[in-house]
Image: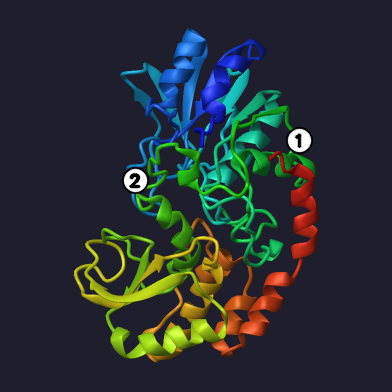
Amino acid sequence: MRRVRTGLNQLKDFAHMIKGNVGYLCHAASIDHDYSHGIEKVKAIFGSRLKKLYSPQHGIFADVQDNMIESNHFHHDFYDLPVYSLYSETRKPTSEMLEGIDHIIIDLQDVGTRVYTYIYTMIYMMEACSEMGIQVVVLDRPNPVGGKRVAGNILDPKFRSFVGRYPLPMRHGLTVGEIALMAKMHWGVECDLKVIKMKGWNRSQNFWDTKLPWILPSPNLANVETAYTFVATVLFEGTNVSEGRGSTKSLEIVGHPKIKHLELVNELNQEFQNDGLKGFVLRPLSFQPTFQKHTGVTCHGYQIHVTDYKEFKPWFVGQVLMQKLYYHLGDEFSWKLPPYEYEEELLPIDIINGTDKIRKWIESDGSYGELLAIEKEGMNEYLINRKEIMIY
């Protein structure tokens, strides 16, 4: 199988269309197939016309660990360019940040899950560029969890936040370039947009099928496998159950000091079997986080080992596991309280889920059939809109 060519890999072929000064929105995973960073590539193509750099959440080097820890603007001495953080006092670039720029090149590795904030940084940039008449060029990259499977409820607009601004399911099945097209066609984001497509990518591919190197796009997604379990484990950010931050297997494991993990595992496995959830093994383990929840305290819980990526349904696994732990822990379980990702009033679990229906489903010990019904709400409209903008 041939290596996929990303939008960055093909940028040089489209350089003749980019006439003016350039800004580049990127992060640590904005690399080419040879591991060279996109800043080097863009600078080699445009020379002194590359005027400014921009970074999303976690910073341009993906070195900032946690949520709501902002990055500073600074001057990059090696490249002799200003770097503007779009996870700072503002998420939307200001007119001053874009002054003197004719084209913004966006090159961000997404992970295919609605709550991952880079797609919203991209759309904020599109909105700002629309206001200033700046062209946006999106360099497309693979969806690492594939482009076929769609899963999870559609976000309710009442629960919009920086981890969910638009009616997407949790696992949206789109590339970052397709998200940009969706924003323009269906979400009212008008801008001069050019998406440089990949060559050789198809929707059924997993990331390792692309033969591209994986560079962690944020500090706690070190492996491609974690991008899959993330769809399940990120839900626990809205609770006092650890999602493994501060461990070497962040977002592949969950735990809490009071979980009786060995006693509970057979009951969990039986529940998953009853619901037809397969393609993974839930392995009991204990771990001690070095930061964030339960720092320095031994937690007991589970690592999700994916055994069949086509069968694995992480969103459903995460919701069922959440419901079981809610009742297992009883008074020891709690929902995280605001603020969370700049939302001061709504519960974090509700903005992560994009609805309060799932929290209420958990609290009422709802059936798996009821969870399926929640997922179906609004899904047909999304799938119709998605079909209209798919470019692969």
Q: Which amino acid, mark 2? A: Val
What percent of the width, then of the height, locates residue 218?
40, 47
Farthest residue in the front direction? 1
Earlier sequence position, callout 2 versus callout 1:
2
Q: Which colour scheme appears in the figure?
A: rainbow
Q: Which one is in front, 220 or 125? A: 220
Residue at 36%, 88% in the rendered image: 264
Q: Which one is in front, 385 or 245? A: 385
Q: Quadrant of residue 384?
A: bottom right
Residue at 70%, 57% in the rendered image: 167
Q: Residues within 10 Å of mark 1 (few under 14, many from 20)?
A: some
Residue with the mark numbered 1: 190
Q: Residues within 10 Å of mark 2 (few under 14, many from 20)?
A: some
Q: Which amino acid, mark 1? A: Glu
The number of discs equals: 2
What percent of the width, then of the height, locates residue 321?
46, 79
Q: Which one is in front, 292 or 263? A: 263
Residue 96, visible in the rendered structure: no
| Left-right relation of 86 to 199 | left
Q: Which one is in front, 189 or 289? A: 289
Q: Is residue 61 above or below residue 37?
A: below
What percent of the width, then of the height, locates residue 225?
41, 55
- Is the Cβ of the residue at disc 2 closer than 8 Å to that at disc 1? no
Residue at 67%, 24% in the rendered image: 135
Residue with the mark numbered 2: 64
| Left-right relation of 108 to 224 | right
Residue 251, visible in the rendered structure: yes
What percent of the width, then of the height, locates residue 267?
42, 90
Q: Secondary structure at mark 1?
A: loop
